[in-house]
Amino acid sequence: MEQEICFYCNCRLYQLKNGMVKCSSCAKKYSLLKLQRDFDVLDSFIGSATAKTCATKLNLSYQVVFNRYEHIRKLLIRHSHDYYEYKREKLDEFEEYMYICKSKKKDYTSIIESQNFVTFAYQEKVYNFLLPSLKRFQTKVDSKSLEISSGNEFKKFMLTNRISKLKTIESTITKFWSFFESFITPYKGVKSEYFLSYLKEAEFKFNYTKKEQKEILLYLWRLQSTPKKLIF
């Protein structure tokens, strides 16, 4: 990879003896090879390649790619939060969604493991807010087993606490849910601690074209070092 201008500030670069480059303005030092690797991983992420597929294609370790994917998802969480702060007064349509892994949908007891979130919409974009876990409705029976609290209590909770304000049945929100199910199904279950990251990835990919995704992600990459106003 050859580059004469700095990725971060667009000023002139000069070569260092150790093979890295340094910017004549912001004084950042970095490896062009590593930067190109990050760009390649970014392209795979935008193309929805799994971390395993990307690692094989780029001849990288799975852990390196997984860590980069998680880093990208953290950038998306920040971008999503700032989008919400920017548009919060206009997000007037919303609905709650319960996600259960496809393999567990026929098992009633698995409801307690579901991921619940509220999807807000403004024009053709969505914002998702993850709700607290339903596991607070579990009661401990003994040291080895758990059961759901009384069915009546659980049903009462679902009826009285459902969050909803939809203008039409067919909406941007329902389109997103369909997109999300198609996006998440190939992963065959996502651990709770990673669910928000995958939800925000789906949100980002639903909201923007691939071209827009790349422009925003490159911008966010630069933003880590030089804070600027976010773009939407």
Image (spheres, rainbow, N blue to C red):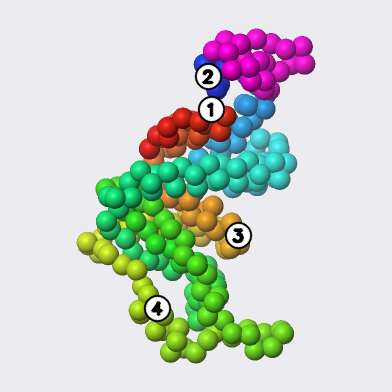
Q: Earlier in the sequence, mark 3 or mark 1?
A: 3
**Residue beneath disc 1:** 226
Which segment is the magenta one?
Answer: 11-31
Mark-to-mark CA distance, 4 and 1? 45 Å
- Disc 1, disc 2: CB below 8 Å? yes
Characterize the local packing of mark 2: few (<14), some (14-19) or many (20 or more) Cα atoms within 10 angstroms. some
Q: Residue at x 67, y 85 (%)?
A: 145
Characterize the local packing of mark 3: few (<14), some (14-19) or many (20 or more) Cα atoms within 10 angstroms. few
Relative to residue 131, is residue 205 depicted above or below? above
Q: Earlier in the sequence, mark 3 or mark 4?
A: 4
Q: Mark 1 is on which residue type?
A: Thr
Q: Mark 3 is on which residue type?
A: Glu
Q: Secondary structure at mark 4?
A: helix
Q: Which mark is residue 158?
A: 4
Residue 3 seen in the current view:
no
Q: Secondary structure at mark 1?
A: loop
**Residue beneath disc 3:** 193
Q: Residue at x 39, y 84 (%)?
A: 156
- Disc 3, disc 1: CB below 8 Å? no
Characterize the local packing of mark 4: few (<14), some (14-19) or many (20 or more) Cα atoms within 10 angstroms. few
Q: Earlier in the sequence, mark 4 or mark 1?
A: 4
Instruction: Look at the image and say whether residue 26 sits in the magenta stretch.
Output: yes
